[in-house]
Amino acid sequence: MATQLPELPAIEDSLTRQGELLDEWVALGAEIGALEARRAELLAERLDLLAQSRLASDEMAFRSMCAEYAAAGHVSPSTFAEHISSAWMLVRMFPASLAALSSGAISRRHADAIVAEAPQASSHPDAVALRNEYENKVLPFAESSTVARTRAHARAVAAAVFPEGTAAAHRRARGDRAVTVRADGDGMAVLTAILPEVLAYAIHDRLTSMSEAVITARPKGQRRPRRSTLEKIRAERDAALAEQSPSTPEEPVDLEEHFARQFDEPAPWDSPVLAPEPDARAADAAAAQAARVFTEADTEQEISEFDLLDPELPTEATFHNSTPMHDGYGVQMHDTRTVAQLRADILADMLLAATPTSITQTSLESVQARVQVTIAASALRGGDDDLAELDGHGPMAADMARILAGTTGSWERIFLDPRGMVVETDNYVPTASMKKFLRARDQHCRFPGCRTAVSRCQIDHNHDHAQGGRTAIDNLAHFCTSHHPLKHPDVDDRDRWTAKQLDDGVILWTSPLGRTYTDEPPLRVMFV
């Protein structure tokens, strides 16, 4: 039975409703902009309060504040640090852009682009005039254009207004070279390399050229186009056939039959017969010619990839041995990789096959020394400077012992009786089995919202080891190098956080404001 489409309202009523929906959508955008502007004002005021009460260089105070807001807003501290810095600049340095955001003339993303691309002229004597000139030229453009175009335009305006600042910014930016990785779901990850622009584009171009060479080396008929290209070829063929056939009245569409045919139709390379239909050979030739003039902007593939399937090629044919054939996990019989996929595969092959002999450590740097030092707990905490003892040799300064204790990979706590005899020891470093358990339990930093992997975290004694905390599973957790220092005893009380482990590995964090936040260990299996 054919499925009937729902009855549509009258054209006039439909157009009226469409206009109403559009107007309401635009109005909501303006309201959101006003709210975003208010949020920026609140963050700017908070940063001003910090600057008034603390030294500008007090990084721990800033980090603690960011941690508080990040935990309350369920964002990462690094993300919030960017937000509050951008908000302060928007409110204090670009008032016209803030007003445009409040009125809904631009979005928050437009405002962020204006701030991010502004000329770096803070030390220039005419900094205010330069920023005003920049804003006056960028803001009208932003009010009538997209974020991407606004960002590109702002970058060009900044270079024209303050060229020496742009050059200096480029030199400084080179110091931010880095390679990062983050999970992208479905077993994939995003590897990001931050490089000078010219090098990044040169690398991309070389990968493209190498990918084209792989495609060109495929035997004729095995240069399979992507499904999107095949769809375009089919459309060209259908159009050519329609011009050759007399027009006939359209029959009612059976939606069930239509969608069944859409999804059940096999791909051309999966069909048992690959030869074109006899009455469509001329149309196929025209479609093939049309496919060859597609631009890279249409398909992101090069002309060499548009060779149609060879009718004489058997479906079980294999590829030339010199052509890499894998999908990232194993060998494939048919190499159907696109240029984008080939870029990724070649990049991985080149990086993983190279041996960085120039940066590997020498055998001399691999040598490690071992000494045994005994120091009182009070001296270790910095409560006094009583001499420590280099066992077997004699006394040593307490400050040197504290340095060794902070950098060594292993040290033990000794419990003495009133006579000074050893009655118990407690290793500061967790055992191998403890570390395995903690890695499996924590998976990432245990500060609320932080996703730093355990491989880049430190195992922390929630109750300080120097103050009696034991090296036990119920007193240990992984904290990253950003959140671990927040609970150190040398941090100002106005900025210091505390962490306490509850039952089942739950970490209870208490902020300097007395607010509490909990972090539960993630479940290992989500579908039980």
Image (cartoon, rainbow, N blue to C red):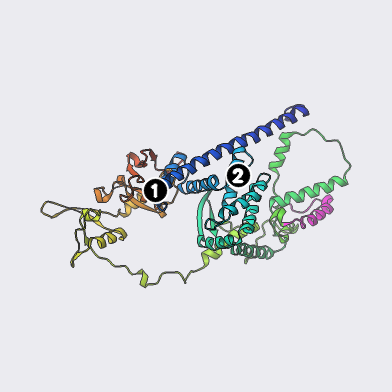
Query: Tag 1: Cα neighbours inside 10 Å, few (<14), some, or many (≥20)?
Result: few
Locate the N terminus and report the quarter of the image it occupies: top right
Q: Nearer the viewer, residue 287 or 396?
A: 396
Locate the C terminus and report the quarter of the image it occupies: top left
Q: Nearer the viewer, residue 176 or 321?
A: 176
- Element marked by disc 1: loop
Magenta stretch: includes residue 471: no
Query: Tag 2: Cα neighbours inside 10 Å, few (<14), some, or many (≥20)?
Result: some
Give how far across and how far down residue 368 sits, in percent.
Answer: 32, 67
- From where the camera sits, is residue 251 visible? yes
Reading the image, the residue beneath label 1 is 54
Q: In this image, 362 relative to 158: left or right?
A: left
**Amino acid under label 2?**
Ala
The CA distance from mark 1 to mark 2 is 29 Å
The stretch in magenta equals: 272-295
Q: Is residue 121 above or below residue 87?
A: below
The picture quadrant where one finds residue 36 is top right
Q: In this image, 15 relative to 60: left or right?
A: right
Q: Residue furthest front?
A: 125
Q: Nearer the viewer, residue 440 or 207?
A: 207
Give how far across and how far down residue 85 sits, in percent.
Answer: 50, 48
Q: Residue at x 49, y 69 (%)?
A: 355
Give how far across and how far down residue 524 sits, in percent.
Answer: 42, 44
Earlier residue among tags 1 and 2: 1
